[in-house]
Amino acid sequence: MPNRNLDGIYFRVKRGDKYENICWTDLTRDERELLSQNRTLEWWQILAEHLTNVIQNMGNDFDIYGGER
C-alpha cells in the first residue's frame, strides 16, 4: 500500500537499508508499537487530538458522514 501522508505526524524509521520519514497512519503495526513504547499520557492526548482534527477536516472537506443522517 502506498504512503498517503494524511496525518502530518512523521517519524524516522528504518525500512530495509535506508531511513524514511513516515506518517503515523502509514506506519506498520509493529513500527507503531515500537515507537509508542514509553510515551506519556500527554503524548497520547496530543496524538489523539491531532488525529481528531485530521478526521474532522476530512469529513468537512469531502462532506463525509458515518452511519445514517
Image (cartoon, rainbow, N blue to C red):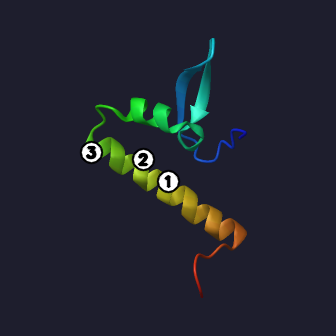
Report helix, strand or loop for mark 1. helix
Q: State the separation of the CA atoms marked 1 and 3.
A: 15 Å
- Check disc 3 and report the residue beneath it: 41
The quadrant of the rendering that contains the C terminus is: bottom right
Indicate the amino acid at tag 3: Leu
Disc 2 or 3, which lies upstream in sequence? 3
Looking at the image, which residue sits at the far bottom? Answer: 69
Alpha carbons under labels 2 and 3: distance apart: 10 Å
Side of 1 relative to 7 (left or right): right
The tag on residue 51 is 1
Residue 22 placement: quadrant: top right
Q: Nearer the viewer, residue 41 or 25?
A: 25
- Residue 49, horizontal then vertical, whole percent: 42, 55
Marks 1 & 2, CB-CB < 8 Å contact: yes
Q: Which residue reaches farthest front?
A: 30
- Give the residue at x 60% y 40%: 26
The residue lying at 71 percent from left, 68 percent from top is: 62
Q: Earlier in the sequence, mark 1 or mark 3?
A: 3
Kindly indicate whether the residue at mark 3 contacts the one at mark 1 (C-beta within 8 angstroms).
no
Percent of width and height locating residue 6? 63, 47
Amino acid type, callout 1: Leu
